[in-house]
Amino acid sequence: MWRIGQLARMAGVSERTLRHYDKIGLLVPAAVDRTTGYRWYGVAELSRLERIRGLQHLGLPLRRIAELLDAPEAQVRQALTEIVATIRHDIATLAATAAHAEDHLAVPMSILPQRATVDSRQLRVRRMRLNHPDELAAVCPAPPAALLTWLRGEPTGGFAAAVTTDGTGEQLSLPARTVVRAVVPPSAGVIRAGQDLFGWLHRHRLDVAGPTVEEHLIDADGAHAIVLEVPVSPRRCARAA
């Protein structure tokens, strides 16, 4: 039999860790001296401690280890499969975050695009056709309102547009969709922000999947903001000839 300090040295853990395991019922000593309070451990406890440490190194938290310590091996393998899936998801998320940060460092932009899923919308609009982006300022209504443009990048000629109306006009349905959204900061013009946004979509291999919505918002204090929202889909790979 070994005292707590001896077991701690043998297993490479601290006495505090062993006391914690005892407190939560994960590793109870083989015996406790009623007079001195010394904890005594044997081979069975050493083996159990090694299994606890091994499961910890595989990524299982103590709460889950307590549930699986005496479980069949098949149940342990299922838990490890779930841990691996979670780790891979976290790695993918971190890699995407790093890629976005690197992109922002490599290509200075006026906006910080974000992906989001939005619900369907019903709008009343007045359609028009414009010849140049400079004409947008003249047709854009006062906030709160929205301007829609059917563009897949910087325009090279005429393009379709629409503005929302109070109640008259054509009804337009926008389905639930995945969008890339960006708030245009006061220091950046909406045209420059739109150019930056389309460039970002191209670098991230996303195609425009519907009209871009340029929403002009105003709060109770009269502060004005512009939000650009582009529905997107992953770019399809070109088929080999």
Image (tube, rainbow, N blue to C red):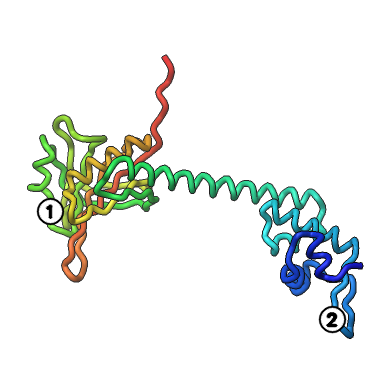
Q: Which residue is mark 1?
A: 141
Instruction: Work out which residue is located at the far bottom of the displayed protein and give it.
Output: 35
Q: Are marks 1 and 2 in contact (CB under 8 Å)?
A: no
The kind of secondary structure element at disc 2 is loop
User: In the rendered view, would you say 123 is above or below 234?
Assistant: below
Where residue 87 sits in the image (x, y, percent)? Answer: 59, 49
Q: What's the residue at 35%, 51% (across, down)?
A: 120
Q: Where's the N terminus, which quadrant?
A: bottom right
Where residue 182 sits in the image (x, y, percent)? Answer: 29, 51
Q: Quadrant of residue 3?
A: bottom right
Residue 167 appears in the picture as rendered? no
Task: Measure how far apart labels 1 and 2 are at the Cα level.
Answer: 80 Å
Drawn side of residue 82 relative to residue 15, left or right: left
Q: Which residue is mark 2?
A: 37
Q: What's the residue at 79%, 56% (across, down)?
A: 51
Drawn side of residue 61 relative to residue 229, left or right: right
User: In the rendered view, would you say 156 is above or below 26?
Assistant: above
Drawn side of residue 52 relative to residue 31, left or right: left
Q: Quadrant of residue 55?
A: bottom right
